[in-house]
Image (cartoon, rainbow, N blue to C red):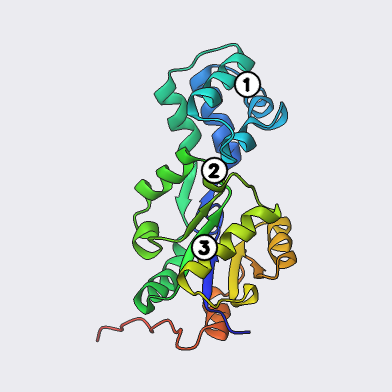
Amino acid sequence: MKTRFVYFDLGNVLACFSLERLLRQVADVAGCASGEIKIALFEENGVQKRFERGDIGADEYYEWVCERIGRRPVRVAFFNAVNDIFWFNERIEPSLTVLAAMDFPRGILSNTGPHHWNFCLRSFPVIPETIPANHVLSYEVRELKPNRGIYEAAIRTARNVVPDLAPDEILFLDDLPKNVQGALDCGIDALLYHDQIDLTAVLAERIPGFTIPPPIVLK
């Protein structure tokens, strides 16, 4: 299958993250149990999803958590704890570098809020350097994967770069089966990304001219 555009998910594809670390860090700055933070963020009315969908802003997000846990941690410390949960996936960097050198059409398709997004751009400059544009972010388009609307937005964005693009000429890499299936249901060529996948082989199979140069051996 020929690929003419590639989308990468952000979390656990371009940058790995730990929800356990988020819960522990927020609990530490708030002086409460991590279970209380989990309920406030993920279980009681899904404030994290509402934030990532762009339904609420940072102020409302912070106030919601403060009200639910009955504490007011220092705002800066709170958001530092929420954001500092990522580390760059170094295994993916060679593929990003080659795609950038080819100027191959590419972008990011992610469920994310503005704080996580901006933290990753600042912390891992290789991401904006190798994928500078064509981002479809849930908080901007007001849709979450695996809902159909976000994939339709992704197709439109890709067609701004490749006007005659067919959905199955888009390759999307995501770490969650439900998000992969959502893309497949919209006609997009989607694959489940995990530690064992040989991404260079996947891209070489689909993109003519894609090769990772061998390492230079110094004599």
Q: Is residue 87 above or below residue 99?
A: above
The quarter of the displayed image where residue 33 is located:
top right
* Residue named by callout 3: 157
Mark 1 touching mark 2, by CB under 8 A?
Answer: no
Q: Which residue is found at the position 44% from the left and 84% from the top?
A: 211
Is residue 217 depicted above or below 113 in this figure? below
Instruction: Name the residue: 51% across, 62% down.
Output: 157
Q: Earlier in the sequence, mark 3 or mark 2?
A: 2
Looking at the image, which is closer to me, 16 or 109?
Answer: 109
Label 3 vs label 1: CA separation? 42 Å
What type is the residue that disc 3 sits on? Thr
Label at residue 33 = 1
> What residue appears at the point 49 percent right and 29 percent down from the top-left corner?
58
Pair 1/2: label in front: 2
What SS does tag 2 mark?
helix
Between the C-alphas of marks 3 and 2, the distance is: 15 Å
State yes or no: discs 3 and 1 in contact (Cβ < 8 Å). Answer: no
Numbered badge on residue 215? none
